[in-house]
Image: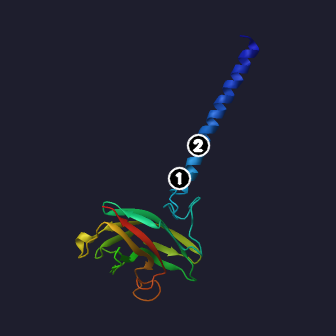
Amino acid sequence: MGFISKLIMKKIFIWLIILIVVVILSAIIFNYITASLGPNTGYDFIPYGGDDCLGCNKPTLTKSLVFPKDIILDKGKTDFSLGYYNHGTKEITNVKIGVSECLNGDGESFIIEEGGSENDFLLVLSKTYGAIQPNDYGSFHVKILDNSENTKFDLIKGTYVCRLIVYTSDISEGLGSLQEPYEEKQFFLNVVE
C-alpha cells in the first residue's frame, strides 16, 4: 500500500468517527427533546419540574388547566403533572388541587366533601403552591389514592367522570373555595384494580 492510499484510508477513518459522534449526539438531543414533550398520549401534559417547562403544553389564558384527560387508578394510586394558569387580576396564594365530585357508570353522583382529604374516598395529594401571580402559571405534581377503605364508600372497578378543582384551602366561601373553585375541569378516572 502506498503512502497516498494510507493517507486516504486515515481520512476516511477520521470522517467515519466524526459521523458516528454526530449520530450519537443527535440521538441524545432527540431523546431529550421528546422526553420533555411528555408521553405521546394525545392528552395535554406538563412534565413536573417547575416553571421552566421546555417544549411542553403550558397552560394559557384560553387553556388554563392542563393535565391528562384519562387518569388510571391502578393498585389504588396514580400520579400525574398539572399546570394551572391564573387568568384572574389578583395574586392567588396557597393554591391546592382537589377533586369535588365523581359520577359512576350508572350516573350516581359522589360528592367529595373536602376536595380529597383523609375523610374522602379519594385522597388527593399535591404540594400547596405558595402564590401564582396574574397571567402566570404554576406546575403541580398530583397523586390520587384510593381511600375508600377508610370511608363508607366502596370504590369499585370502572370508569368515573370526575371534576378536578383548583382552590385555596384558606377560603371557606366565595371565589377560591371548594364550592367556588378558581378553575374546574372534567376528567375520566379509570379504576382498574
Q: What residue lies at 67% left-to-right and 27% top-to-bottom? A: 14
Q: Secondary structure at mark 2?
A: helix
The CA distance from mark 1 to mark 2 is: 12 Å
**Residue bearing the label numbered 1:** 35
Q: Of the numbered discs in the image, which one, if any, rests on residue 27? A: 2
Q: Is residue 165 above or below residue 34?
A: below
Q: For the residue marked with disc 1, what is the amino acid? A: Ala
Can residue 63 be seen in this snapshot? yes
Q: Few, some or many C-alpha atoms within 10 Å of disc 1 (few <14, some 14-19, many ≥20)?
A: some
- Does label 1 or label 2 sit earlier along the sequence? 2
Q: In this view of the protein, which residue sits in the foreground, 185 or 176?
A: 185
- The picture places residue 148, in percent across and down from the top left corner, at 26, 71
Instruction: Name the residue rendered at 40%, 74% in the picture.
Output: 162
Residue farthest to the front, as pictured: 106
The image quadrant where one finds the C terminus is bottom left
111 with respect to 68 (left or right): left
Percent coordinates x, y for residue 163 in the rendering: 42, 76
Residue furthest to the bottom in view is: 174
Residue at (44, 77) in percent of width and height: 165
Task: Using the image, tell me which numbered label, if any, was put on residue 3.
Answer: none
Which residue is painted at 23% across and 72% down in the image? 150
Which secondary structure, mark 1?
helix
User: Splitting the image into 4 quarters, where does residue 16 fall?
Assistant: top right
- Residue 126 placement: quadrant: bottom left
Residue 118 location, quadrant: bottom left
Viewer can see residue 127: no
Residue 17 appears at what percent x and percent y?
Answer: 64, 30
Badge 1 vs badge 2, beta-carbon distance below 8 Å: no
